[in-house]
Amino acid sequence: MTTSIQAQLGRTAPSAQTLDTPDRIELLMKAMGTVRKQLRELYKQLGETADPAERMVLIKRIDALKEMLHAMQEQLILLTQMEARRKHMRAVSSAPSEEEDPPAPPPSTP
């Protein structure tokens, strides 16, 4: 199951390089949803089985998916921070510069 998610992510990774950050965030969130769904299914299977060998296999798969989900969460945080910085820099660069001459004050009438 873990390898199927990694395969899915591997297929999307090359195209993710050409996507803009909001699209990459959306793609990552969808992948995280898939991992969470698989975790729920594995926990359900774990609760239904009494076989110690099968439980060990399920626990290892759950641990691997939890590690993958944690890595995805960290990547999501980085992408979100990067997008926030990018928006801030756009706002700063589009604001009038202090070096420009300020508008002249209106003429005062005595």
Image (cartoon, rainbow, N blue to C red):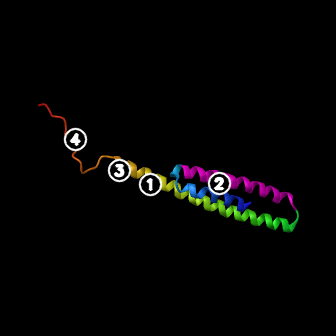
> From which residue to which does the magenta span run?
23-49
In the image, 92: left or right of 45? left
Q: At numbered mark 1, what does the secondary structure look like: helix, strand or loop?
A: helix
Tell me which secondary structure the magenta stretch mostly adopts: helix
Q: CA distance from mark 3 to mark 1?
A: 12 Å
Q: At numbered mark 3, what does the secondary structure look like: helix, strand or loop?
A: helix
Earlier along the polypeptide chain: callout 2 or callout 1? 2
Q: Which residue is mark 3?
A: 93
Q: Label 4 crowding class (10 Å Cα cut-off): few <14, some 14-19, many 20+?
A: few
Q: CA distance from mark 2 to mark 1?
A: 23 Å
The amino acid on which the numbered mark 1 sits, given as a three-letter code, is Arg
Q: Residue at x 60, y 51 (%)?
A: 27
Quarter assignment of residue 109? top left
Earlier along the polypeptide chain: callout 3 or callout 4? 3
Q: Which residue is mark 4?
A: 103
Q: Which residue is mark 1?
A: 85
The amino acid on which the numbered mark 3 sits, given as a three-letter code, is Ser
Q: Residue at x 61, y 62 (%)?
A: 71
Q: Label 3 crowding class (10 Å Cα cut-off): few <14, some 14-19, many 20+?
A: few
The residue mark sitting in front, 4 or 2, is: 2
Q: Residue at x 21, y 46 (%)?
A: 101
Q: CA distance from mark 1 to mark 4?
A: 29 Å
Q: Which residue is mark 2?
A: 32
Q: Is residue 90 covered in magenta?
A: no
Q: CA distance from mark 4 to mark 2?
A: 51 Å
Number of residue marks: 4
Q: Label 1 crowding class (10 Å Cα cut-off): few <14, some 14-19, many 20+?
A: few
Residue extending farthest left = 110
Please state the horizontal and vertical placement of residue 9, each as a whole percent of the image: 64, 58
Earlier along the polypeptide chain: callout 1 or callout 4? 1
Instruction: Say if 76 sits above or below 102 in the image.
Output: below
